[in-house]
Image (cartoon, rainbow, N blue to C red):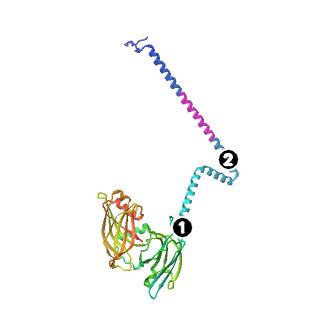
Amino acid sequence: MILLPGTEQLDIRMPFPDEVKYTILGISILLFLIAMGILIWQVQKCCVRANDSKDLVSSLVTEDKSDLSGNSSLHSQGPRFKEEYAHEQVRRLSRCLSQDSASASVLNGSLESLEDQEEEEQMRGSLHFSLYYDQLQAQLVVTVLEARELPPRDFRHSVNPFVHVRLLWAREAENEEEEEDEEEEEERRRKEKSFGAPQPMQCVLQEWQSRLVQNSSSPAFGDQFSCAVPEEDVLRITVKLEVRDFDKYSRHEILGEVRTPLSNLNISYPLDLWQDLQRPRKDLVGEVLLSLKYMPTSQRIEVGVLKIRIISKSSGADRALYVRASVQCNQCKLRHQKTAMKPQWDVTVFNEVMIFVLPDSQVRECTIAVNVYEVHPEKKSSKHLIGQLTMGKGRQSEDEHWKLMTRSLRQPIAKWHPLYV
């Protein structure tokens, strides 16, 4: 043993007997052999994967070569074979997607056919009626004669029809004299830009209802109605006839309607008409200026009825208007309030606020229905629905006002809303 100068000999010995030393040496050798075996197995596995990838690449190369040779043959065969080959490749590549698209197209086609069938079933039927204007007595006579091939409801095999007749009168644009402030004019212009040309405003002159014929899809009515109409107003009248199915326990369903403007007809003699039923449409009869304010702390909604604009043949102290607002949640009426009666004018000013206390969960899901009624102070029991609107969740233009209310907390937001009947 060679020792460096300045160093001492160190005797390193393990304080174990020889049997323990040999045992530890054997265990270490065994662990080394196991590690080497695992390493060799992993190397072999990697080599097998590399060989498989080489085989896959070689197969792809051979396929590409065959495709290139096929393409060269196609180039020599002409454009017709090129097109056929291209179509074949497209069909091969989109084979998986074609099944899904085919099933989707079949499903869409079936849904469209079902919708078309439903529309045909709903709009099936025709109405026979007659119109006559007596110039001597200045009376308009409407006679409801019969209907044919009326469709029943889905859950019933029969129909109980009756006809609702309505005379709509439209004022000429040149005769309209309405005083509007700058805010109202700006609101109207913005509405025209966003929703297009506004629907002409009309008023209901008279309403009638024919007798009920039970369990008949081709009923005969024979009801005659008449009212006094000046001759200069005849050309501005549209006769609207709605065929409805009577239901004792729910709303009457509208099976279809017929509209006949009198401006293009000569009704100096009785004129019989057969017309097919069309899809029912609502008529614009006025506008309501409403303000909404939401108070989250006190959990209440303030609905302010500011103004109502309608057109009417007669206005003043003989007729009055009032508004009834109700809160609905999941098609259930929770609360309702109504304003005081005001004399009816072209623009009736209310400036009244109705307060509804609602939890936050109901505010997000509820809708508010506003109905405008006309009453005669002399006849307290009689009331007539002028028009109605519903605002809240999922109500298109009315929903915009609702969103503005929820964003502008504790601030009243005013907006004009159309009244339909």
Q: Main secondary structure of the magenta part?
A: helix
Give yes or no for residue 48 being in the magenta stretch. Answer: yes
| Residue under label 2 | 70
Q: Which mark is residue 121?
A: 1
The residue type indicated by label 1 comes to Glu
Residue sitting nearer the eye, 243 or 133: 243
Against 365, residue 161 (above or below) is below
The residue that appears at 43% across and 13% down in the rendered structure is 17
Q: Which mark is residue 260?
A: none
Number of other residues with Cα within 10 Å of mark 2, as a class: few under 14, some 14 to 19, many 20 or more: few
Highlighted magenta segment, given as a residue range:
39-60
Residue 242's spot in the image, x, y percent? 47, 73
| Quarter assignment of residue 295 | bottom left
Residue sitting nearer the eye, 302 or 92: 302
Number of other residues with Cα within 10 Å of mark 1, as a class: few under 14, some 14 to 19, many 20 or more: some
For the C terminus, the quadrant is bottom left
For the N terminus, the quadrant is top left
Q: CA distance from mark 1 to mark 2?
A: 57 Å
The residue type indicated by label 2 comes to Gly
Residue 260's spot in the image, x, y percent? 49, 77
